[in-house]
Image: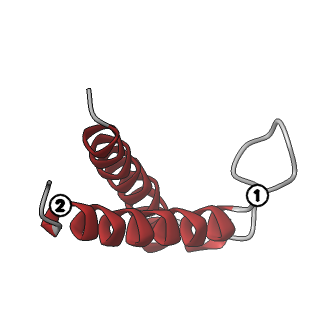
Amino acid sequence: MSKRRILLSLTLTLFVFGFAGWFYIAENAVFHPITLHMPLTHFYKYPHEDTFGAICFLISFVSFFTYNLIRDTKQP
């Protein structure tokens, strides 16, 4: 298996799961906006829901951008 194929799979997976995390927080912001300042889980005080959503959006954006750059390059 080539490194390019592994990197394509990894970036697409990070995009999907990052988007899913961001979408969860976005939906939560619509229906329960008061909880955005609360921790994401009761196990640890960090990250808060809003921070988690921002990190997920960033991961999703960078991963999809990288995926498209790798996918569009010509393979030798």
Of residue 63 and residue 71, the one placed in the foreground of this image is 71
Give the residue at the far right of this rendering: 45
Residue 75 location (% of width, % of height) = 14, 55
Residue 72 location (% of width, % of height) = 14, 68
Give the residue at the far front of this rendering: 76
Residue 5 location (% of width, % of height) = 25, 40
Of residue 52 and residue 24, the one placed in the foreground of this image is 52
Residue 65 location (% of width, % of height) = 32, 72
Residue at the image position 29 percent from the left and 41 percent from the top: 9
According to the picture, the residue beneath numbered tag 1 turns out to be: 47
Nearest-to-viewer mark from 2 and 1: 2
Q: Earlier in the sequence, mark 2 or mark 1?
A: 1
Residue at the image position 28 percent from the left and 61 percent from the top: 67
Helix, strand or loop status at disc 1: loop
According to the picture, the residue beneath numbered tag 2 turns out to be: 71
Quadrant containing the C terminus is bottom left
Label 2 amino acid? Arg
